């Protein structure tokens, strides 16, 4: 079961409810730091007559003991690569096999999974991972009840069906002829067979819980209401011959488009340096929509709440190869940096896993004659496997005060596409936003990828009055220097994209002090921005590309070109010539 928008404090109470329904099975929690060694094997130390012995046993996901276990994922969007691969391989599979560190086991998965995810984070989750959860519920605003039953008591018919035993022990069910057409009608074309099977199985489960013997089309409608799927009109003459007791609460259809509808994609043929890019998929924000103010907790393009398939309405693209560890280009000492995700036989002695090496050597001490000290053979050595750090960076400076009478999404889309395809990190610097903490200072944040919802919000931020462009360029330069000098893996390539008209009206000194300047400003803010840009131009030109997006505003149309010359970069056209001639300047 996958729960959308569940409050974090309710994860533990709901896990206790599910554990109670399953008979208090063993519980496994998967998170961002979960490794393969934590899932498939479990080391054990035992003391015997011959001393301490070391052995490997099946891990928590291998189901060494008969019966089912409960696997809880508090945040599916932040689950590590090892955990995501485990979900795809085990959940819904008939047979699972593991071969790890000399342990070989084959079993039939019986574990029950309970995962939680925010609806706006579904664009960062692999569709293969989401499809493994047949039951999805939007529980935004869920409130628990005081007492031993946080969700309330089960209906009597359901409790009676659960007391009878396993689901397969009851009488066989009859599938009505209208069942399959009704399932396909509700889901629509192009949704995949997993959703159809999930809806049909939910209808079958409801029939079993209510004590009926035939799974009809009306049961499919009941299952659709249960998970929040918009229902189509019932065909005339197709009804359930048995009355529907309706023990469960009916869920009204959610607003918005159905799960079968998708937004029309936009295409772009060329990106930075003229390279050809893949189809863009969905835009960050449709050009015709324009900029809209953002309220708390909602960003433009966020999926509609209440639907069991929010990934169909997600605006950003899914993460590229989300189930695969990114390929590392760097080698040598730089490759031995990053978070540990596993161990393996090493190629050198630079990054040894001493604890795992001692564990490997302890397994063979009985064969080696129990020496007085732990003997480590070359075959026992183990080294760390580390996840690669991002090797590319997109630094985006957004001047919100230059957005009058033009739309910058088309101009910025090639750079966002480059960052998405190369899985680059993003550094966003905002200048002149209306809701800034201080209008005299720029604000910045770092994102793991361009799929971060904060970037979508930053692109649609309303403009303010002041333009601390010099301070924004200073923050961008500091972020680039930190990335090049202190980045653990070493940057291979970086882009600095500045979307501005060059009209900086806040001097750098005023931004540092946080107080308005005394006296007239004149060109002080523009000169400070050019001076900061000149310092950035001295950085590595082989790995850092610089571009100024020109909105072609009049007067002072030469300011973006002066800024690009100071940066040592190029100028990109912000809007076509017909838009410039027709904007009234």
Image (cartoon, rainbow, N blue to C red):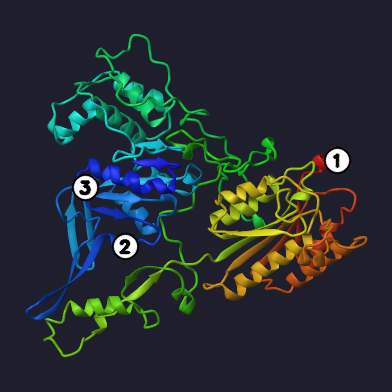
How far is the residue under mark 1 from the one under mark 2? 60 Å
Residue 269 makes an appearance in the image: no
In the depicted structure, whether residue 108 falls above or below residue 485 = above
* Any part of residue 389 in sight: yes
Q: Earlier in the sequence, mark 1 or mark 2?
A: 2
Which of labels 1 and 2 is toward the front? 2
Spot the residue most to the top.
Answer: 237
The image position of residue 439, as x and y in percent, is: 76, 55
On the image, numbered disc 2 is attached to which residue? 36
The span from disc 3 to disc 2 (Cα, nearest Å) is 25 Å
For label 2, the crowd category at 10 Å Cα-Cα, with few meaning under 14, some 14 to 19 and many 20 or more, is some
Residue at 32 percent of width and 26 percent of height: 248
Q: Is residue 223 left or right of residue 448?
A: left
- Pointers 1 and 2 in contact (C-beta within 8 Å): no
Residue at image position (46%, 33%) is 306
Quadrant position of residue 483:
bottom right
Quadrant of the frame with the N terminus: top left
Q: Secondary structure at mark 3?
A: loop
């Amino acid at each position: 079961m996958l729960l959308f928008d569940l409050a974090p404090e309710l994860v533990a109470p709901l896990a206790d409810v599910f554990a109670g329904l399953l008979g208090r099975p063993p519980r496994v929690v998967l998170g961002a730091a979960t490794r393969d060694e934590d899932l498939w094997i479990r080391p054990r130390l035992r003391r015997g007559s011959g001393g301490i012995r070391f052995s490997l046993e099946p891990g928590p996901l291998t189901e060494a003991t008969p019966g089912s276990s409960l696997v809880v994922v508090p945040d599916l969007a932040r689950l590590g690569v090892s955990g995501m691969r485990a979900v795809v391989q085990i959940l819904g599979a008939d047979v699972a096999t593991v071969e790890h560190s000399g342990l070989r086991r084959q079993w039939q998965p019986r574990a029950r999974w309970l995962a939680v995810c925010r609806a706006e984070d579904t664009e960062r989750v692999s569709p293969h991972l989401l499809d493994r959860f047949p039951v999805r519920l939007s529980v935004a605003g869920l409130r628990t009840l005081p007492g031993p039953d946080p969700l309330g008591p089960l209906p009597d018919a359901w409790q009676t069906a659960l007391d009878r035993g396993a689901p397969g022990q009851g009488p066989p069910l009859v599938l009505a002829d209208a069942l399959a057409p009704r399932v396909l009608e509700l889901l629509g074309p192009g949704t995949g067979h997993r959703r159809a099977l999930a809806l049909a199985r939910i209808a079958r489960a409801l029939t079993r819980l209510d004590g009926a013997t035939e799974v009809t089309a009306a049961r499919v409608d009941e299952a659709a209401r249960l998970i929040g799927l918009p229902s189509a009109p019932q065909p005339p003459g197709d009804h359930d011959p048995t009355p529907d007791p309706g023990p469960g609460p009916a869920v009204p259809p959610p607003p918005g488009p159905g799960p079968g509808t998708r937004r029309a994609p936009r295409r772009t043929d060329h990106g930075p340096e003229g390279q050809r890019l893949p189809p863009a998929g969905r835009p960050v924000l449709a050009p015709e929509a324009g900029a809209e103010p953002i309220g708390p907790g909602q960003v433009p393009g966020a999926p509609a709440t209440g639907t069991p398939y929010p990934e169909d309405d997600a605006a950003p693209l899914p993460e590229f190869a989300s189930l695969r560890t990114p390929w590392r280009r760097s080698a040598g000492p730089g490759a031995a940096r990053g978070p540990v995700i596993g161990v393996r036989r090493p190629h050198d002695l630079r990054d040894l896993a001493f604890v795992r090496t001692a564990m490997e050597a302890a397994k063979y001490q009985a064969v080696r004659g129990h020496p007085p000290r732990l003997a480590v053979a070359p075959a026992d050595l183990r080294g760390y496997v580390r996840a690669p750090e991002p090797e590319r960076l997109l630094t985006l400076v957004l001047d919100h005060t230059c957005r009058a009478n033009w739309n910058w999404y088309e101009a910025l889309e090639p750079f966002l596409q480059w960052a998405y395809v190369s899985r680059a990190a993003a550094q966003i610097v905002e200048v002149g936003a209306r809701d800034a903490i201080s209008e005299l200072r720029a604000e910045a944040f770092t994102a793991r990828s361009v799929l971060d919802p904060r970037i979508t919000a930053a692109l649609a931020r309303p403009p303010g009055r002041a333009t601390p462009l010099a301070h924004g360029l200073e923050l961008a330069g500091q972020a680039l220097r930190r990335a090049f000098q202190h980045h653990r893996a070493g940057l291979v390539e970086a882009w600095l994209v500045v979307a501005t008209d060059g009209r900086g009206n806040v001097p750098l000194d005023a931004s540092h002090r946080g107080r308005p300047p005394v006296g007239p400003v004149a060109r002080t803010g523009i000169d400070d921005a050019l001076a900061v840009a000149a310092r950035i131009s001295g950085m590595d030109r082989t790995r850092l590309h610089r571009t100024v997006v020109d909105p072609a505003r009049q007067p002072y149309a030469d300011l973006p070109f002066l800024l690009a010359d100071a940066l040592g970069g190029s100028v990109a056209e912000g809007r076509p010539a017909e838009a410039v001639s027709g904007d009234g300047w």
